[in-house]
Structure formats: structure tokens, C-alpha cells
Amino acid sequence: MKTALTNVFSGRPARAIVNRIIRELGPMCDLAPPFPLAGASRGAPRSKSEAAGAEDFVQLWSGQSARLGRELPAGELTKQLAMETRAKQRQ
């Protein structure tokens, strides 16, 4: 999972997971409207992307530890974290 500092979603730099809009416009785009107008400028593409279940134009905010994430359903992740926590408590 690749992240980048980008201004295309909010008009201000923030860390996000790289998706189509970041790849096509570049992470820091001179054409991005200033805050708070940037979010509204993507309204139609974002809505269509969300309705299709795609992440092409959706802001995917990320902290600096995105690579530590696990790709699995939330319920399974919760079970794994609980088991790991119990194992550590027994130590």
C-alpha cells in the first residue's frame, strides 16, 4: 500500500493512500482548488466512484503506519487482534 502527501482532496497537504486521482493529477497538484473548495470540485466523480464500489476518486486518508495494516474483513481483524492481545497478556 503506497501513500503520498497530496493536496488533491482537500486543497491542503495530507497523507493519503495513492489511488487513480493521485496517480493521474500527481500528489501535489497546482490545479487543485484551495481549501475548502477542493472537496466540492470532486463531487460527481467521487459519488460515481463510491456508488460503483471503486476507490478511484475517493479520499483514502492514511496515517504514517499504513503498511502495518492488514487486508482482511473487519470481523476477522478484530478476532485476530483479540487473540494477539490475550496471548501477550498471558506472557
Image (cartoon, rainbow, N blue to C red):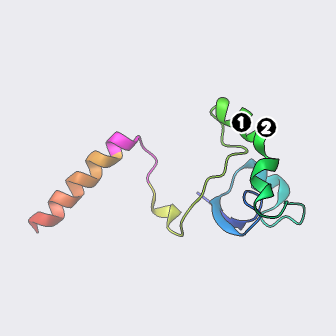
Residue 49 drawn above or below residue 64: above
Q: Which mark is residue 61?
A: none
Residue 72 lies within the magenta run: yes
Q: Which image quadrant is residue 11 in?
A: bottom right
Secondary structure under tag 1 reads helix
In-front residue for pair 91/39: 39
Point out residue 6 in the picture as x, y percentages from the top left corner: 73, 65
Q: Which mark is residue 44?
A: 2
Point out residue 70 in the picture as x, y percentages from the top left corner: 43, 52
Secondary structure under tag 2 reads helix
Q: Which residue is mark 1?
A: 47
Number of marks in the image? 2
Q: Which residues are magenta?
A: 70-76
- Spatial CA span between label 2 and label 1: 5 Å
Q: Residues within 10 Å of mark 2 (few under 14, many from 20)?
A: few
Residue at x 76% of width, y 42% of height: 43
Q: Which image quadrant is residue 27 in?
A: bottom right
Left or right: residue 69 compared with residue 20: left
Q: Which image quadrant is residue 75 in?
A: top left
**In this view, which residue lies farthest toward the left?**
90
In-front residue for pair 86/11: 11
The quarter in which the N terminus is drawn is bottom right
Residue 75 drawn above or below residue 12: above
